[in-house]
Image (cartoon, rainbow, N blue to C red):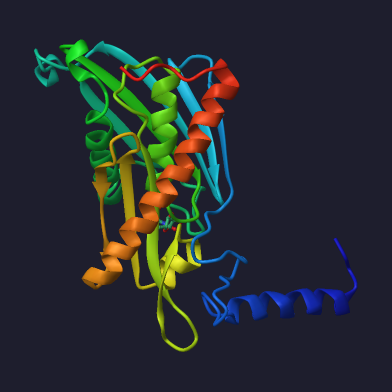
Amino acid sequence: MNSNPDVKLKQNESEKEIAEKPLIDIHGKRKDGRESGDLRKIKIEVGVLHRAEGSCYLEWGGNKVMAAVYGPREAVPRHTQNPLRAIVNARYNMAAFSVDERKRPGPDRRSQEISKVISEALGHVILLERFPRASIDVSIEILDAEAGTRCAGLTAAAVALVDAGIPMKDIPVACAAGKIKDPKQNEIIVLDLGKEEDNFGDADLPVAISPRTGEILLLQMDGHLTQEEFEKALDLAIKGCHTVSELQKKAIIEKYGSMPEAK
Ligand code: CDP
């Protein structure tokens, strides 16, 4: 640490300058230096936990996510069992220390909603009919949050499912696009919103797809987009999904030497 007060002042000034910067400048550069179509940095590690059937640790910008899979195992309580197929229980949880203002531990409406949409998205690609009466439990723990945690959580969960050997039609993947304003108040569609862009931007469109078929598994919208903006944002989010999908595959190949066959 530098104790020289002049240096400290300079550091504070530059922080202030950053805070005052527009979300995207007139040259199309975002605060963190990204262009409109750039993703944040992503790192994926497969099989990091010993006791879970499958796991994945993922960093996506400032997000840090751990996903773990248990099962398929007999669903309990028994009235939740489906005699024809397995049920998917994804549980998204944000750690109390993952956000600036301590989050009250335990489920809230937001985490219940995210758990539900992720469970449904995963349920569309898992071959559920192979495991009647079973449950496949997926824990998604957000350790550090910096916007886009549902996309990061779903992407990590998909890799953990592969690690657990759960048969799937495809490896689902998620990415968001959104809308922010430049200093001339032009609305710009950008990929993968960061924290400030999410807080102060005008719209956020998280999307999950099955990359092999292009099927949309999850689509939510926060804010307002015209039809033209919506189509542009959807296209951009899908492109982002394909890029992230390559990173998922690369991480799996690094661990296993090859990709599991699509069933
Ligand atoms: O994370 P995601 O973009 O999928 O969901 P969101 O509801 O749009 O939340 C955006 C961001 O707000 C999160 O990623 C967190 O960084 C932040 N947040 C927070 O600070 N405190 C909460 N209780 C919930 C979210």
Please, is residue 8 above or below residue 232 in the view? below
Please, is residue 177 above or below residue 202 in the view? above
- Which residue lies most toward the right here? 4
- Among the 4 quarters of the image, the one containing residue 180: bottom left
Nearest to the observer: residue 115 or residue 232: 232
Left or right of 42 in this view: 91:
left
Determine the residue positioned at 51% across, 75% down: 23
Determine the residue positioned at 42% across, 38% down: 155
User: x, y (%) of residue 111?
Assistant: 31, 45
- Which residue lies most toward the bottom here? 184
Determine the residue positioned at 33% across, 28% down: 170
Left or right of 147 in this view: 137:
left
- Among the 4 quarters of the image, the one containing residue 25: bottom right
User: x, y (%) of residue 189?
Assistant: 40, 69
Quarter holding ligand 1: bottom left
Determine the residue positioned at 30% across, 32% down: 90
Q: Quadrant of the N terminus?
A: bottom right
Q: Quadrant of the C terminus?
A: top left
Please, is residue 48 above or below residue 201 in the view? above
User: x, y (%) of residue 135?
Assistant: 24, 18
User: x, y (%) of residue 126?
Assistant: 27, 23
Does residue 43 appear in the picture of this structure?
Answer: yes
Does residue 48 appear in the picture of this structure?
Answer: no
